Image (cartoon, grey):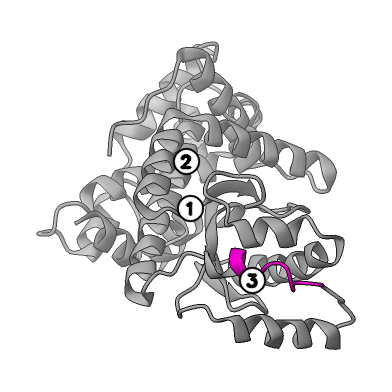
Amino acid sequence: MKATKYTNTTLGTIESTSNRVANDNLTGEKSQEREKHLVELLRESETFQEFSNSFCSVTGLPLTLRPATYWNLPLHRVKNEGPFCQAVAESPHGCSACLQMQEDLESAAQDTAACKECPFGLIDSAVPVKIEGRTIAFLQTGQVAIKPVQKVNLKRAQEILAKKGIQLDISNLEDAYLQTRYVEPERYQSMISLLKFMADHLSSISNQLAIRQNNAEPVFISRARKYIEENITEELPLSRVAKAVHTSSFYFCKMFKKVTGLNFTHYVSRVRVEKAKTLLQNPNLRISEIAFDVGFQSLTHFNRVFRNITGVSPTEYRRTEL
């Protein structure tokens, strides 16, 4: 995959948004809007656009990156949308049935990739994109059959929907239904594995941007960042770093959070995790060695912090990188 490319303007905008989102203590609509804006920026990035075009061309399936909270049908009117799903989605009763399935899928995919089957026997899949262990978006694909479609499935689906009080006339949709893309289960699982890789990459972009240096930051904050980098293998209480840059602990704590968007402990953890991610690409290093090399005092603490920030364990991350 090509290296990530951003214009300076886009990079600065994503960085600023990522800093706010990753450590935003606000709740409700304001926090959701910030997360939604970050997802939009990631969706517009060249990395995602290139991946999306390649995925759709190779698989023939639709793909979208959508916010975690989304009240519409994610795959409606996107490239490669299936003709049958498009027709059902544009029917008021059919839309209701699809929305219920999407709600179930989102619930199942909060922590890991999930697949759900609709009454028509078609599969939709979602892979979570996370920041600090919190799901902010989903990579979603689907509208695919992993078993050959048959006309009898339509009648069975109609009966299932009728029991739920959904009356849907699908007598004129047989031809469209039989055009549904069929993919062998093993091949479809490989496609989902690709989405997992991309979801991890998008999460990594946001996490890396969250610790980038702000060009307008005070000199003592820049010095603190450098001091942390140079002494990351040691214990780094806030008081020690504040003393090293000649400020009081109270003032340093207040300004560090204001400038970086991260509290001091979270920042140090992120720097350690980013260094650990590099070391994990060396198969000759044990995970316990890496944990201590980046400044963690116990393997248990390292595993917990790494998963909270990246969404996967160090072992799982190494498996995807090697």
Mark 1 and mark 3: Cα distance apart in space? 47 Å
Question: In the rendering, at what x and y percent does residue 273 appear?
Answer: 37, 48
Residue matched to label 1: 309
Residue type at mark 3 is Glu
Neighbours of disc 3 within 10 Å: few (<14), some (14-19), many (20+): some
Quarter of the figure with the N terminus? top left
User: Are the residues flagged by discs 2 and 3 in contact, CB closer than 8 Å?
Assistant: no
Amino acid marked by disc 2: Asn
Tell me the residue that label 2 is attached to.
207
Whichever of labels 1 and 3 marks the residue nearer the N terminus, that label is 3
Kindly identify which residue carries mark 3: 174
Q: Would residue 24 be found to the left or right of residue 286 on screen? A: right
Q: Residue at x 69, y 40 (%)?
A: 36
Query: Is residue 235 in sight in this rendering?
Result: no
The kind of residue on which mark 1 rests is Ile
247 left or right, relative to 100: left
Q: What is the magenta range?
A: 169-176
Q: Residue at x 52, y 65 (%)?
A: 180
Q: Main secondary structure of the magenta part?
A: loop
- Which of labels 1 and 3 is toward the front? 3
Looking at the image, tell me whether mark 2 or mark 1 is earlier in sequence order: 2
Disc 2, disc 1: CB below 8 Å? yes
**The C terminus: image quadrant:** bottom left
Residue 196: in sight, yes or no?
yes
Q: CA distance from mark 2 to mark 1?
A: 8 Å
Mark 3 falls on what kind of element?
A: helix
Q: How dense is the environment of label 2, judged by Cα within 10 Å: few (below 14), some, or many (20 and up)?
A: many
Residue under the point 64% across and 69% down: 105
- Neighbourhood count class around disc 1 (C-alpha, 10 Å): few under 14, some 14–19, many 20 upward: many
Alpha carbon separation for disc pair 2 and 3: 47 Å
Q: Is residue 182 above or below residue 203?
A: below
Q: Percent from the top left, x then y, of residue 301?
A: 42, 64
